[in-house]
Image (cartoon, rainbow, N blue to C red):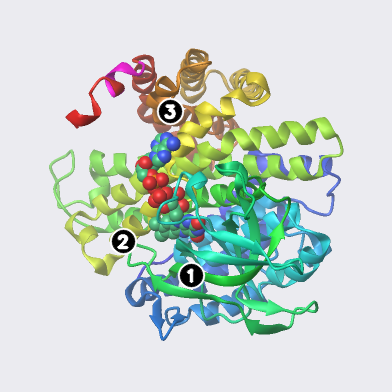
C-alpha cells in the first residue's frame, strides 16, 4: 500500500530560512502567527492527510462515485472522512474570522492543499471548490447573501460547486445559453444544462451551493451579458435551515480517465431559484475571483501528485534489484543507475522549487489582503495575478510529467494497478485541462498579464529576481544555479520584449514555450534562495538541497535556450500550414 510522509521538514526550512515568514507576518501586524505555529498546524494537517485521506485514495479510484436513483453516492469512507475533515477545522483554516474562519495565513492553506492533493486529489476538490465559491460570494454578494451562505460554507456544513461549462461553451463563455428570468421577488428562475460540474452533488449532507453563470433576458451578447447566481440545492431560511428542494438535478455522472471518486456531474437547472451575485451582466468578473483562487489550487494539485509519486518511486528505486553497477557487481538497487536518478531528480527539482514558489506567492496573497500600505497591497495583488497562470499551467504540466516519470521508475510494475502509479498518472492529467486549459493559461500570461500596469508588473518582477540573484551571489559566491538563472532571466527578458505588441498569432504560437521559460526562471530564483540558505549548514538535508540545486541548474535550466529559440522562431512555423492540410 502507498504511504505518504508529509514534507514537514521542508516546510520548516522554507518558513524559517528561505521565505522569512516571521518577518512577513510582522509586517502585516500578525505577530501572533509565526513559523512554529504554522509548522504545528501543517504537522497536524499532514497527519490527517496521511492517516485518513491516503487510505481512501485507492478505494475512491476503484469504487468511484455512482448515481443511484438520481442520488450521488461517493465511495466508501468519503462521507466519514469529510465529516472528520470538518471536525478538524480544516475547511476554515484561512477563511475570514468575521464568518467563522480561523484567519490563518494563506501559506498554511496552500500547503494543506499540497498534502490533500498528494493523498487524495478527488477528495480535495470538495473543500477546494467550496473555498473558491466562498471567496466569490465574499467579494461580490450582498450582505444578506453573505450572512446566509458564508458561515455554513466556511464551517464545511455546506459545500460549493462552480457551474460555468456547457456542451457548447467551454473556454469561450460568451457562447453560454443558460437563462435566468426575474421572479419579481428578488429571486430568479435559472434554466439550462451545465456539464462537467465537479462536486455538483454528493452524500455528505448539508446544502450544495452552486455558483451558476447565466444570461438575463436583457443581456447583451457575449461575455458582457453573463451574470452570476447562487443556486442552492435546497432553499434555505435566513438562519440556515434547509427547506424545499430546488428545481435542479444530476442528469448523469461523467465517466472519466481519473479522479473517479469525484462526482463530475451533468446538472439540469429547471427553473431553479437563484439569487444574483454582484451586478447584472458582470458575472464573469465575479466568477474570476473564484477561478483565480481555484487556479492556484489546481497548480498545487500538480505539485501534490508529483511529491507523492516521487516518494513511492524513490522508495521503490532503493529496493528494486536489477542490473549491475558501474563496478560490474550486481544485481544492484536501480537507484544506482544514472537514468533512474535522472528521473527522480527531475521530479524532486520541480517539487521543491514549486513548493517554495507556492509559499512565496501565498505570502503575497496575504500582503495583498492585509498590508497596511495600499500601494504594497496593489503591488502584491498584481504579482499574484502575474504568477497565477504560471503556477496553474507549469505546475500541472510538471505534475503530469512527474507522475509519468515516477511510473517509469517502476518499469512494467508502474503500469499495473497494484502499485498505484498509474492512478497518479490518470489523476494528474485533469489538472492540465480544467480551470482553463494550460494552453489558455499561457495565452492569458502573454496576452493579458504581460500588459499589466503597462508592462511594469512583469518588469518589476524581473527586477526583483535580478536583485535577489545578485544578493545571493554576493553571499555565496556564484553558485551554478545563480549563474544559470541569471542567463535564463536574460533570455526571458528578451522574449518578453519580443512579444510586446505581438500579433495574436505570434503571441499564441509562443505562449506555451514562454510560460515554461517563465516557470524555469521562477524556479531557478527559488532554487537560488534555497541554495543560499543551504550553504549555512552541513546537515544531510542542506547538502541534499545544494545537490538538487546543481541538478536543476545544469540539467533543467538549459531547456531555457531551446524554449527561447522556439519563441524567436515566431508564428510562421505554426501558422503556415493551411487548416485544410491538417
Ligand atoms: C473532470 C472535469 C471537471 C471539471 N470541472 C468543472 C467544474 O467544476 N465547473 C465547470 O464549469 N467546468 C468544469 N470543467 C470544464 C473545464 O473547465 C473545461 O473542460 C475546460 O475549461 C475546457 O473547455 P472545453 O472542454 O469546452 O474545451 P474547448 O474550449 O473546446 O477547448 C478545446 C481545445 O482548444 C483550445 N482552445 C480553446 N480556445 C482557445 C483559445 N482562445 N486560444 C487557444 N486555445 C484555445 C483549448 O486549449 C483546448 O486545447 C471540468 C472538466 C472536466 C473534464
- Name the element at disc 3: helix
Q: Using a 10 Å C-alpha cutoff, classify the residue at mark 2 as few (fewer than 14 neighbours), some (14 to 19) or many (20 or more).
A: few
Task: Say which residue label 3 marks.
Answer: 511
- In three-dimensional space, the C-alpha distance between marks 3 and 2, rounded to whole angstroms, equals 27 Å
- In three-dimensional space, the C-alpha distance between marks 1 and 3, rounded to whole angstroms, equals 36 Å
Q: Nearer the viewer, residue 235 or 199?
A: 235
Whether residues under marks 3 and 2 lie with C-beta atoms below 8 angstroms apart, the answer is: no
Residue 576 seen from this side: yes
Which quadrant holds the N terminus?
bottom left
Residue drawn 63% across the image and 40% down it: 361
Q: Using a 10 Å C-alpha cutoff, classify the residue at mark 1 as few (fewer than 14 neighbours), some (14 to 19) or many (20 or more).
A: some
Residue drawn 68% across the image and 69% down it: 153
Residue drawn 32% across the image and 67% down it: 255
Based on the displayed image, in which of its 4 quarters is residue 247 positioned?
bottom right
- Compared across the picture, whether 330 is left or right of 453 comes to left
Q: Which residues are magenta?
A: 570-574
Task: Say which residue label 2 marks.
Answer: 257
**Residue 184, above or below 576:** below
Counting residues from the start of the chain, the first of labels 1 and 2 encountered is: 2
Q: Nearer the viewer, residue 481 or 241?
A: 241
Amino acid at each position: 500500500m502507498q504511504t505518504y510522509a508529509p514534507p514537514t521538514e521542508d516546510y520548516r526550512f522554507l518558513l524559517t530560512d528561505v521565505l522569512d515568514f516571521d518577518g512577513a507576518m510582522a509586517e502585516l501586524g500578525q505577530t501572533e502567527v509565526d513559523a512554529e505555529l504554522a509548522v504545528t498546524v501543517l504537522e497536524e494537517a499532514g497527519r490527517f492527510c496521511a492517516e485518513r485521506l491516503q487510505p481512501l485514495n485507492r478505494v475512491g479510484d476503484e469504487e468511484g462515485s455512482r448515481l443511484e436513483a438520481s442520488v450521488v453516492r461517493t465511495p466508501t469512507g468519503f462521507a466519514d472522512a469529510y465529516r472528520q475533515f470538518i471536525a478538524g477545522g480544516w475547511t476554515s483554516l484561512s477563511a475570514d474570522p468575521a464568518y467563522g474562519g480561523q484567519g490563518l495565513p494563506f501559506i498554511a492553506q496552500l500547503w494543506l492543499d499540497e498534502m490533500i492533493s498528494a493523498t487524495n486529489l478527488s477528495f480535495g476538490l470538495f473543500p477546494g471548490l467550496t473555498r473558491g465559491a466562498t471567496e466569490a460570494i465574499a467579494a461580490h454578494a450582498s450582505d444578506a447573501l453573505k450572512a446566509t451562505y458564508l458561515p455554513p460554507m466556511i464551517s464545511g456544513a455546506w459545500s460549493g460547486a462552480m457551474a460555468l461549462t456547457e456542451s457548447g461553451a467551454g473556454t469561450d463563455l460568451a457562447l453560454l445559453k443558460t437563462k435566468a428570468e426575474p421572479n419579481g421577488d428578488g429571486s430568479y428562475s435559472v434554466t439550462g444544462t451545465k456539464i462537467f460540474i465537479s462536486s455538483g452533488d454528493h452524500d455528505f449532507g448539508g446544502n450544495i451551493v452552486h455558483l451558476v453563470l447565466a444570461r438575463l433576458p436583457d443581456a447583451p451578447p457575449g461575455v458582457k451579458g453573463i451574470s452570476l447566481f447562487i443556486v442552492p440545492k435546497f432553499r434555505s431560511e435566513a438562519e440556515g435551515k434547509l427547506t424545499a428542494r430546488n428545481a435542479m438535478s444530476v442528469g448523469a455522472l461523467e465517466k472519466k480517465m481519473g479522479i473517479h471518486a469525484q462526482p463530475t456531474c451533468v446538472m439540469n437547472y429547471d427553473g431553479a431559484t437563484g439569487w444574483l451575485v454582484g451586478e447584472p451582466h458582470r458575472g464573469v468578473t465575479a466568477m474570476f475571483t473564484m477561478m483565480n483562487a481555484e487556479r492556484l489550487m489546481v497548480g498545487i494539485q500538480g505539485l501534490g501528485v508529483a511529491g507523492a509519486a516521487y516518494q513511492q518511486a524513490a522508495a521503490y528505486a532503493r529496493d528494486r534489484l536489477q542490473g549491475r553497477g558501474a563496478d560490474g557487481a550486481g544485481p544492484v538497487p536501480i537507484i544506482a543507475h544514472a537514468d533512474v536518478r535522472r528521473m527522480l531528480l527531475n521530479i524532486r527539482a520541480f517539487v521543491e522549487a514549486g513548493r517554495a514558489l507556492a509559499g512565496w506567492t501565498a505570502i503575497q496573497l496575504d500582503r495583498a489582503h492585509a498590508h497596511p500600505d495600499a500601494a504594497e497591497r496593489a503591488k502584491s495583488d498584481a504579482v499574484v495575478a502575474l504568477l497565477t497562470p504560471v503556477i496553474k499551467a507549469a505546475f500541472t504540466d510538471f505534475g503530469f510529467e512527474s507522475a509519468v516519470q515516477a511510473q517509469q521508475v517502476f518499469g512494467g510494475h508502474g503500469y499495473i494497478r497494484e502499485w498505484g502509479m498509474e492512478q497518479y498518472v490518470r489523476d494528474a492529467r485533469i489538472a492540465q485541462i480544467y480551470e482553463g486549459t494550460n494552453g489558455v493559461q499561457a495565452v492569458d500570461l502573454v496576452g493579458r498579464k504581460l500588459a499589466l500596469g503597462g508592462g511594469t508588473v512583469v518588469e518589476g518582477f524581473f527586477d526583483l529576481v535580478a536583485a535577489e540573484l545578485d544578493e545571493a551571489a554576493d553571499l555565496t559566491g556564484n553558485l551554478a544555479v545563480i549563474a544559470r538563472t541569471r542567463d535564463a532571466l536574460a533570455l526571458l527578458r528578451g522574449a518578453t520584449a519580443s512579444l510586446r505588441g505581438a500579433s495574436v498569432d505570434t503571441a499564441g504560437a509562443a505562449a506555451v514555450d514562454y510560460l515554461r521559460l517563465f516557470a524555469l526562471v521562477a524556479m531557478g530564483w527559488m532554487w537560488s534562495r534555497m541554495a543560499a540558505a543551504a550553504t549555512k549548514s552541513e546537515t544531510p538535508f542542506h547538502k541534499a538541497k545544494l545537490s538538487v540545486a546543481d541538478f536543476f541548474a545544469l540539467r533543467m535550466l538549459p531547456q531555457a535556450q531551446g524554449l527561447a529559440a522556439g519563441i524567436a522562431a515566431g508564428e510562421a512555423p505554426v501558422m503556415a500550414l493551411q487548416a485544410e492540410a491538417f
